[in-house]
Image: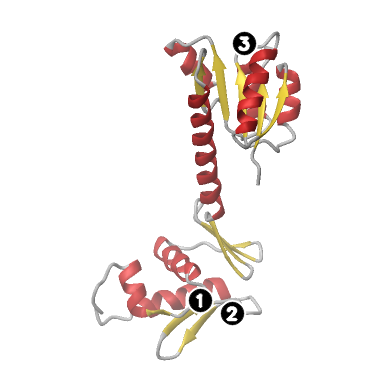
């Protein structure tokens, strides 16, 4: 999939130079000549990176990025500017930019920074995709550490949550008591207690009681399995 870059630059020759170079590097490029048009195009939400000149007439580049962030636009933004003091760079980053490059710049450096922004954005996206686990109508939010089933909140203790997360990461597969002891309790031997079964029984009551279909299954002689069917 071709990545899309929005260049917001009022100087026609610089805009053309950036569009040509980024296009030759394989990106689809659109150009806006002022911040208002740039903000309008950015609001479409289809761009992977914004390259924004700081010194735009009237509504400047930092104000545009600030407005974009306030509107929920999360595409990473690289600011280009002739203002290169520490205070200028810090001000740009605090305004919502993700990187700051002073003019004059080499195109190779600009391209490397764009690629770095894309890698970071991809990593964040991958992380967000794994921040939730679901099994049937059971949803586990790993960041908020909350669990819901069919939209109903299910409060769990810390150990119960870890146990459920482990089962969900292995959904559809048998998880033995030994595996759970090692992973959740850090026991590398069987302590001879029924600690796993006690926690499983408690977890089962919380996630299955009151629902028509059980999710937590006992696999006789082997262990337990979390599965929608």
Which sits in the foreground, 17 or 187? Answer: 17
Camera-side residue: 136 or 110?
Answer: 110
Q: Position of residue 143 (x, y in %)?
A: 50, 51
Mark 1 lies on a secondary structure that is helix
Closer to the chain start, of discs 3 and 1, is 3
Q: Is residue 203 left or right of residue 197?
A: right
Which element carries disc 3, helix, strand or loop?
Answer: loop
Residue that mark 1 sits on: 204
Tell me which label, 2 or 1, sits earlier in the chain: 1
Q: Report if the CB atoms under discs 3 and 1 are less than 8 Å apart.
A: no
Question: Residue 203 appears at what percent x and percent y?
Answer: 48, 72
Q: Where the C terminus falls, by quadrant? A: bottom right
Please give the residue where the numbered disc 2 appears in the rendered image: 214
Residue at the location (61% across, 30% down)? 22
Residues packed near mark 2 inside 10 Å, few (<14), some (14 to 19) or many (20 plus):
some
Task: Check the image and report above or below for 187 versus 144.
Answer: below
Which residue in the protein does label 3 denote? 55
The answer to whether residue 195 is visible is: no
Q: Residue furthest front?
A: 24
Snapshot quadrant of residue 42? top right
| In the displayed structure image, the side of residue 190 where residue 59 appears, left or right | right
CB under 8 Å between callouts 2 and 1?
Answer: yes
């Amino acid at each position: 999939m071709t990545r899309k870059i929005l260049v917001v630059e009022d100087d026609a020759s610089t805009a053309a130079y950036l569009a040509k170079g980024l296009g030759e590097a394989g990106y689809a490029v659109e150009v806006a000549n002022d911040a208002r048009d740039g903000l309008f195009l950015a609001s479409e939400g289809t761009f992977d990176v914004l390259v924004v000149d700081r010194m735009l007439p009237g509504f400047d580049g930092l104000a545009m990025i600030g407005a974009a962030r306030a509107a929920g636009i999360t595409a990473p933004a690289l600011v280009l500017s002739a203002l290169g003091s520490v205070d200028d760079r810090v001000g740009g980053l605090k305004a919502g930019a993700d990187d700051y490059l002073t003019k004059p710049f080499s195109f190779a450096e600009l391209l490397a920074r764009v690629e770095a922004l894309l890698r970071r954005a991809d990593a964040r996206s991958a992380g967000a995709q794994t921040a939730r686990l679901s099994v049937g109508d059971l949803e586990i939010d790993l960041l908020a550490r909350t669990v819901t089933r069919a939209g109903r909140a299910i409060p769990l203790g810390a150990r119960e949550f870890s146990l459920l997360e482990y089962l969900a990461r292995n959904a559809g597969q048998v998880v033995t008591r030994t595996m759970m002891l090692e992973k959740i309790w850090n026991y590398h031997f069987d302590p001879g207690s029924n600690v796993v079964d006690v926690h499983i029984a408690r977890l089962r009551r919380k996630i299955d009681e009151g629902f028509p279909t059980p999710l937590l299954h006992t696999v006789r002689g082997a262990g337990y399995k979390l599965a929608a069917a």
